[in-house]
């Protein structure tokens, strides 16, 4: 196997401390870094906020992480040229969906979900993963992790419906941020909250691939999803309980067994997804013949 040097571009400063991270692109960058390094490749994390060409190490290929990093680079032709000069191979993006037109800006588009049938051949499925050593639920009484609500009509609807079920179930809740617009919680704190919980409430509608729900699935935590907001493209591979009647959800919460075997079976399903597997798919895409 040929060892590659890969630059991962993310919103991460030099000398970073991962416990202070709070965004999708930061966690993804570190996850992919671990996946590639475990396969024997060298990874440089490049800070997207400082596009000075002298600070970009020479490499074989570049992977830009989705979100803020991608949006900063996409319209910036000068930055893209500087990145390409540091790279002997491809300028690619790891995308949290399969949005159109990214093949105009990047040589490969690696997607979290499987690309739609009519997508360009540059769109290649990479999948997602997490670190199971960090996210496995600790034993304890049942608690419910409630993600933040959106301040939209659908967000208000979900808040009202979940609240009815919570009142009926009478199980303790953990909700670090009530509304999405209220701010962010560092990932170390978020991880400590989720490790205490047995369920994860998907409160933000049909998001393509929220980081929290991915990590929740890795914990062995069932996702609680209103039927009107179920997205099988990202959620069917994880353990889900679909509901529309708050009484049905409350009954499920009360009846769900806390035994270790049940949790292990859920975790085994989630462990089909790992950063190593994602890294391998990306490597296959990088080594593919010119598309």
Image (cartoon, grey):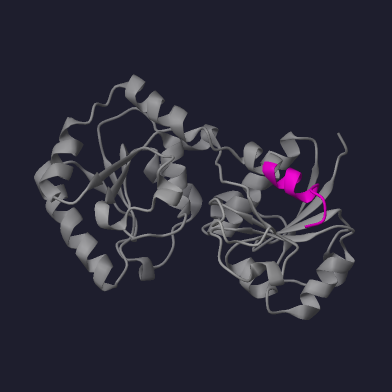
Q: Does residue 285 appear to the left or right of 57 in the view shown?
A: left
- Name above or below for residue 49 compared with residue 88: below
Q: Residue at x 63, y 71 (%)?
A: 101
- Name above or below for residue 182 compared with residue 161: below
| Residue ranking furthest to the front | 118
Q: Does residue 73 appear to the left or right of 234 in the view shown?
A: right
Q: Residue at x 26, y 39 (%)?
A: 143
Is residue 118 a member of the stretch shown in magenta?
Answer: no
Q: Residue at x 26, y 52 (%)?
A: 227
**Residue 220, image x and y in percent?**
40, 33
The quadrant where residue 216 appears: top left
The quadrant where residue 138 appears: top left
Is residue 287 a member of the stretch shown in magenta?
Answer: yes
**Residue 171, image x and y in percent?**
18, 41
Q: Residue at x 34, y 27 (%)?
A: 139
- Name above or below for residue 75 compared with residue 30: below
Is any part of residue 170 visible from this angle?
Answer: no
The stretch of residues the image draws in magenta is: 281-291
Residue sitting nearer the eye, 63 or 286: 286
Q: Does residue 190 appear to the left or right of 281 in the view shown?
A: left
Question: Which quarter shows the C terminus?
Answer: bottom right
């Amino acid at each position: 196997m040929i060892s590659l040097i890969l630059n991962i571009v993310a919103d991460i400063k030099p000398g970073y401390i991962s416990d202070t991270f709070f965004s999708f692109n930061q966690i993804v960058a570190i996850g992919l870094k671990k996946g590639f390094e475990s396969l024997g490749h060298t990874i440089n994390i490049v800070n997207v906020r400082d596009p000075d060409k002298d600070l970009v190490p020479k490499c074989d290929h570049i992977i830009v992480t989705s979100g803020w990093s991608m949006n900063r680079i996409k319209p910036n032709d000068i930055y893209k040229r500087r990145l390409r000069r540091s790279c002997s191979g491809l300028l690619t993006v790891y995308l949290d969906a399969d949005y159109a037109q990214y093949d105009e800006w990047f040589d490969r588009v690696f997607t979290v979900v499987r690309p739609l049938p009519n997508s360009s051949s540059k769109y290649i499925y990479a999948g997602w993963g997490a670190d199971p050593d960090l996210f496995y639920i600790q034993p304890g009484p049942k608690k419910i992790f409630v993600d933040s609500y959106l301040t939209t009509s659908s967000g208000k609807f979900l808040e009202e419906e979940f609240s009815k079920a919570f009142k009926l179930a009478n199980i303790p809740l953990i909700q670090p941020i009530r509304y999405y617009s209220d701010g962010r919680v560092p990932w170390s704190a978020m991880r400590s909250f989720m490790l205490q919980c047995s369920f994860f409430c998907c409160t933000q509608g049909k998001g393509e691939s929220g980081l929290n729900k991915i990590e929740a699935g890795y914990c062995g935590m069932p996702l609680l999803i209103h039927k009107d907001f179920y997205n099988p493209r990202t959620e069917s591979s994880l353990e889900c309980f679909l509901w529309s009647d708050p009484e049905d959800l409350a009954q499920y919460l009360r009846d769900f067994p806390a035994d270790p075997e049940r949790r292990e079976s859920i975790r085994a399903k989630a462990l089909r997804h790992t950063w190593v597997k994602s890294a391998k798919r990306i490597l296959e895409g990088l080594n593919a013949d010119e598309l």
